[in-house]
Image (cartoon, coloured by chain):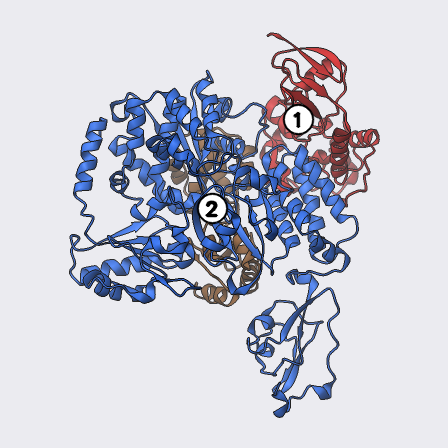
Amino acid sequence: MAQLNSPEELEKFRQEVVSRRDPNTPCISICAGAGCIASGASEVIATFKAEIEKEGLKTDVVDTKETGCPGFCERGPIVVIYPEEICYLQVTPEDVPEIISQTIKKKQVVDRLLYVDPTTGESATRESDIPFYSNQERNIIGNNIHIDPKRIDDYLALGGYSALVKVLSGMTAEEVVEEVKKSNIRGRGGGGFPAGRKWEGSRNAPDEPKYVIVNADEGDPGAFMDRALLEGNPHSVLEGLIIGGYAIGSHEGYIYVRQEYPLAVENVNIAIQQAEVYGFLGENILGSGFDFTITVHRGAGAFVCGESTALMTALEGRAGEPRPKYIRSNIKGLWEKPSVLNNVETWANVPLIINKGADWFTQFGTDGSKGTKIFSLVGKITNTGLVEVPMGITLKDIIYKIGGGIPEGKQFKAVQTGGPSGGCIPEELLDLEVGFDELTKAGSMMGSGGMIVMDEDTCMVDVARYFINFLTDESCGKCVPCREGLRQMLKILTNITEGKGKAGDIELLEELSEVTGEASLCALGTSAPNPFKSTVRYFRDEYEAHIKEKKCPALSCKELISYHIDPDKCSACMICLRKCPADAVDGAKKKIHIIDQEKCTKCATCFEVCPSRFSAVQKISGEPVPDPIPEDARTIAKKSKEK
Amino acid sequence: MDINRIDQIIDRYDSDASALIQVLLEIQSENHWLPREALERVSEKLEVPLSRINHIATFYKAFSLVPKGRHEVHICMGTACHVRGATRVLDTVEDLTGIKPGETDLDLKFSIETVNCLGCCALGPVMEIDGKTHGKMSPAETSDVLKSYE
Amino acid sequence: MSEILLQIDGKEVKAKEGMTVLQAAQSAGVSIPTLCHHEKLEPFGGCRICIVEVEVRGWTRHVVSCVYPVAENLVVKTRSEKIDKIRKMILELLLAHAPDSPELKDLAQAYGADKDRFEKDASFCIHCALCVRYCAEVKKANAVGFVDRGIRKEISFIPEISSKECKSCMECFPLCPTSYLQAVFVLTEALASPSPSSDPEQKQESLPPTGSG
């Protein structure tokens, strides 16, 4: 592979790549993202390859492609067969021979592997017909299923690096900055700062050298959009970064990626190597005279390193303690030099903005929030996965139209956005049109895009405790309000969930929130009180029930619930008696079972194993357990089973 | 760990002090923990004070200053997994192995750590053992998976 | 270095470019409380007690004066209801660790902080980092540093270095507002080289001075 030394050479090469691909040759695309791999995709891929070889089918008859994550993670492993775009879900190795014989050889669809709409019963053959996908606007993530991230030619075949060509051969650095400014794209990592303005600040800063940085730390638990992009389409991020470097006058890029994403680390390193071979990185890129190199730096397990100044401190080889941001990092950042740090998704948007123009970009979204956003829709939701939607879509549409609503017939309670810096949004606000400012006004924030759906079984006080616990673990510990403020908040919240809450606790938590929110050194600290503040704003009654009545309305907090077997429903089947790890169930065949509250460890095993036709085990909170029925009433006579 | 091996790793990064974390990650990955001698060697060759290396080795969760077991069990406690019952998976692992997160059992068989999000949220609750991800874990399945490891 | 004119608590103050608000205030005789600040050390910004309100281009925000640079026409307020509330709570949070610290007790009196507001914690380190920073920046010995993070963060001596350097230096000891530093030093010494002598009087002589200077 010779280096491509000019835009003309690139275009010629691209034509050759495209001409070698027959769009009508069947191609079996199997998602090889971390999620599907965890669901067994590796075995599916291996089985496809073995079966194809066994059947003696050559690559001009059928090809396989291991792709990036297309987002419907709940139903993986996912297989899409082109050119018909037939989408099979939850494919197992056992399904493979049938797919080869039916779909590849006989052009017939295997119905049982198709998506079936739970309400209408209709099945969808093509990927784009599945409501989960059809209701999205997949400008960025839509490419994942077409790309093998380990093959740069796939990216070229889709027009990859044409934005870089446009920039290097026809735009000045200032023009690039202007276009990004015109697009009004706001940072996709959480801060929501206008990227164009950030770039302009660095462009105009007289200091050298300058740096561009990809924040791929993605520390928000529940968020995995960046993982899918970096694993699945790393070149889109590289291309954006090189363009950004050109725009501000930087020749060195860094990608800070968390080490918990080994596949993303692997794929981005392969992508960089291939880009170097092709000449998209290095000296005199495509004959333009512009030099640019990228270094990958792995994180080592610290959420706080997702904060931009802490990330830069970590890049310098230090413990990731944030610095005060009184002078912005785009002026004094990495090594005190002008540095533009942006999130993975922000960088991935750049080639699109350059190729299709800021005007195209601004037709998506709202006035204050332009473009599309990828959200990770997780938790108590039917269709878990990654969804890309235009800003301005309502939460209700995301959760119900795309997400398929709450499983098991449970009631929606809240959706948590923005990670540990965000808050919970209750049902009455579901018509909220998603956008940076709208979410902030509701007491939450956009954050990196994590969207965790919670139902009636989720205790909101426990949610606040969970996040504060997370943050005390992840706080760097440098400043008093965060370290000490969160330490005290955690103690109080834990006490409340254990039934030890007392009057004045909420007020003390509110005061601690005020100080931590105002005086902390970095955004981890100043936003730490948000989960508490939003849950107390919308679910204050739950806090009060925990404190005043020692009751957990969601029946979730272990210390506040007791398990009780309803004597009217118990049929003495002995299942819970045998399974109870604490031997706390007293009973016998035909003798109604009773839980010994002294021995009960509240593990919930009895609650889960009691057959649904009896549903005899109840959770009780805030009131005493009913007294056991008298001994002579415990015997079940055959006839009295009639109800 | 062999001093030469440590030197090789350091040389790969041109003995650049800013690559300290990357060097330690490689040593941790190969050796499964960071012995004192390794830290002292890194301090000497990268010309970085040992106090800074100690801070970094304890600040970041990826590093361990004590030997780890043959099998590293990571239980995800991210929000999505938490909401789907990760605490019960953790309880099961603790009961079966007899150790708590951050600990290694006496046979040096299992080491347990909690992690804050592996990015497989759709499959929660998630448990990762030796780099292999196991999704949709229930307490019973957790028990089966653990028992399959020697 | 050009001269900068700013306002602190209604008073006109002349400062030089590159100065911090704290330095400008101190030069004008305006007192702002500090705990982690020291003229010989780089500003740390950890205790947050020097927090002040600044107004620049119509925007008001709270910043820590030990780090915030002076700017032309900056309007600074060193006391307000909000500032006092923040300082009071910072003190109460720290008093849970070191209720007997003279510096904390003095400030507690000035701001009405209640040392019993929060349950006492076993460690009396307040993380001002004066010891760590002094040893790194002034002595360049790096005998003591931090380990871990968050609520588990603590100071730690490197026994091989401290056994050689500290006895003849001890310059950081008077800086510690709580004497936690001395306690950790003694513990480190004892663990690294347990004394064979059982004579209590012999042991007394080798203890470092306590209390702050």
Q: Which mark is residue C63?
A: 1
**Residue situated in front as seen by the camera: A104 or A391:** A391
**Residue situated in front as seen by the camera: A25 or B115:** A25
Tag in front: 1 or 2? 2
Is residue A581 placed above or below A10 in the rendered structure?
A: below
Image spot of residue A555 (x, y percent): 65, 63
**Residue situated in front as seen by the camera: C172 or A494:** A494
Q: Which mark is residue A375?
A: 2
Is residue C24 placed above or below A474 in the rendered structure?
A: above
**Residue situated in front as seen by the camera: A436 or C44:** A436
Quadrant position of the C terminus of chain B in the picture: bottom left
Q: Which chain does brown denote in the image?
A: B
Q: Secondary structure at mark 1?
A: strand
* Residue at image coords 31%, 29%: A164
Q: Which chain does red denote in the image?
A: C
Q: Secondary structure at mark 2?
A: strand
Is residue A609 placed above or below A449 in the rendered structure?
A: below
Image spot of residue C16 (x, y percent): 64, 10
Q: Amino acid at mark 1?
A: Val
Residue C122 visible to an observer of this rendering? no
Image spot of residue A119 (x, y percent): 44, 64
Left or right of A507 on screen, residue C148: left
Q: Colour of chain A?
A: blue
Left or right of A36 on screen, residue C169: right
